[in-house]
Amino acid sequence: MLLLLCKDNIFFCIMIKPKKYLGQHFLKDENIAKKIANSLNNENLLPVLEIGPGTGILTKELLNLYKNLTLIEIDKESVEFLENNFSNDFKLIQGDFLKLNLSEIFNSEFCIIGNFPYNISSQIFFKMLDNREFIPELCGMIQKEVAERIVSKHGNKTYGILSVFIQLYYKVELLFTVNENVFLPPPKVKSAVIRMTRYRKTIGNVDEKKLFLVVKTAFNQRRKTMRNSLSSILKKETDTTNEIFNKRPEQLSPEDFIILTDLIDN
Ligand code: SAH
């Protein structure tokens, strides 16, 4: 994109060609950037990690709010731009968030924010879940359709694996939608900002690996009842007379999946 910048009262242009394969859609509306930055509650002023800062429109707002800011950006050109145009009041890592060893960078809890690369948003959330012990809050812009799936309650068609996994640990809120014409280039999909606030780190007595397996196996054949879709992982002696086994996965709340896993295990 062609960026018009003002530095020391001199206007100049630079070219950063948005790279489609990196999901680059640069936000151009500062008010929306401000709104996203303010959507993170971060009551305890924990360190903040921004994923995919690009040319730094959101970074600029975050710098007004936080002293402890880390950026992870995969694109060399964007990294150079950030280095050259911002005072370095942040830690800037060039690399792939999905490959980042979070424990090497943070030794305590931190929050995540970003106008995320939409092509890897689900993977970002799975990584958040794997590291949930350290991540009490995440706030970011993603494809609206994915945001709707995440906040979807049981009983809805859009309710699925991601909804269950995330809602097992995080309170999820779709905060507002964002029009495509505030991006350069405009994405083909609608966008929305979502907030996730952790309400527990672990689930009491249940075997979480088993729970995840149950959820995945069930949604693999979402039209079937639990008795049928789970047959491959049920033991012969498992008592499936409970009414829950007559249901289809989208009829079960995250808590129901915990109950179900308990029934299967005992
Ligand atoms: N936050 C900026 C840019 C959003 S576009 C803005 O609002 O304008 C998404 C950004 O994520 C791009 O800068 C892209 O280079 C970066 N990105 C894509 N894949 C990434 C990955 N795996 N790890 C880190 N950053 C990534």
Image (spheres, rainbow, N blue to C red):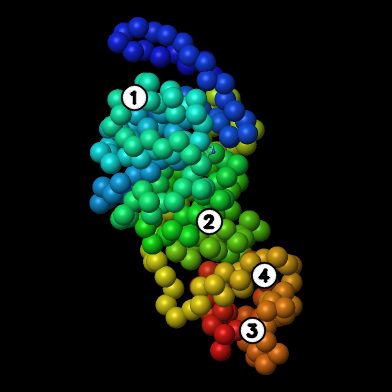
Mark 1 or 3, closer to the camera: 1
Residue flagged by tag 2: what amino acid is it? Phe
Residue at which label 1 appears: 86
Position of 3 relative to 41 (above/below): above
Badge 1 density bin: few <14, some 14–19, many ≥20, Cα 10 Å? few
Q: Residue at x 67, y 70 (%)?
A: 217
Q: As rendered, which of 26 and 106 lies closer to the eye?
A: 106
Which residue position holds label 4? Answer: 217
Disc on the earlier residue, 2 or 1: 1
Question: In the shown orientation, is residue 16 left or right of residue 220?
Answer: left
Task: Say whether residue 29 is visible.
Answer: no
Name which of mark 1 and mark 4 comes first in the sequence. Answer: 1
Image marks 3 and 4: residues in contact by CB distance under 8 Å: no
Between tags 1 and 4, which lies in front? 1
Residue ID for mark 2: 126
Q: Nearer the viewer, mark 2 or mark 3?
A: 2
